[in-house]
Each structure stands twice: as structure tokens, then as C-alpha cells.
Image: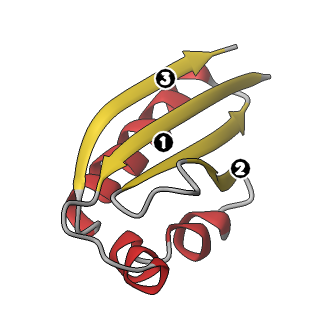
Amino acid sequence: MHIAILTLHVSLPGCASLKEKRQRMGGLHERFGRNPAVAVCESGEHDRLEASEWTFVAVGNERQKIESLCSEIEDKVQRTVDGRVMNVTRELL
């Protein structure tokens, strides 16, 4: 069993409200939480409107598939979120 922890720090310049922050993050929880191999949560920056931190935990039998899934998540977030990914941390267990 392989586990990957992917943490993304996103900058949301000009974000003025919590409602706007949620809209700009584009429903990450709903989009990625449907996959039974992935758990997702907003893990930090709760008090800041211009930043957000999200953590994804992916579990699977093959390390290569887990790494591919993390890359797919990272790419999709960079393409769909109305913000800038500033830092990515990936940990494989």
C-alpha cells in the first residue's frame, strides 16, 4: 500500500470575501473527493482571504499510479483555480 500527501499553497490576489475565496477555489472538495482513492481538505490559511492551502491524500497499491494521480491533481488545480499555486509539497509514505 502506498500513500501520497500532496499539499498546495495557493495565492488569491485581490480576494475580498470568504464567498469569493470559495468561488475562486472552484469546488476542489467536490471535484476530487469523488475519487475513492483521494481524500481532500482545506488544511490551512483559513483566516486569510488572499491565500488557501489544500491537502490531498491519495492511496493505492502501485506507487507509479499514486504519483500519476498527484500530478493529475496538481495540473488540474493549476488550470482551473482562479489563483496562483505558489508552493507544492509532495510526500510519499
* Distance between mark 2 and mark 1 Cα atoms: 9 Å
Q: Quadrant of residue 42?
A: bottom right
Q: Which mark is residue 69?
A: 1
Residue type for callout 1: Leu
- Could you tell which of marks 3 and 1 lies nearer the N-terminus? 1
Q: Which residue is mark 2?
A: 37
* Foreground: disc 2 or disc 3: 3
Q: Are marks 3 and 1 in contact (CB under 8 Å)?
A: no
Nearer to me, 47 or 84: 47
Q: How many marks?
A: 3
Residue at 46% over, 86% down = 19
Residue corresponding to mark 3: 90
Task: Pinpoint residue 77: horizontal percent, then vertical percent.
Answer: 33, 57
Q: Are marks 2 and 1 in contact (CB under 8 Å)?
A: yes
How packed is label 2: few (under 14 Cα within 10 Å), some, or many (20 or more)? some
Q: Position of residue 73 (x, y in %)?
A: 42, 49
21, 8: nearer the viewer: 21
Query: Would residue 31 appear left or right of 34 to someone viewing this image?
Result: left
- Say which element carries label 2: loop
Q: CA distance from mark 2 to mark 3?
A: 16 Å
In this rendered view, identify the residue nearer to me: 10 or 3.
10
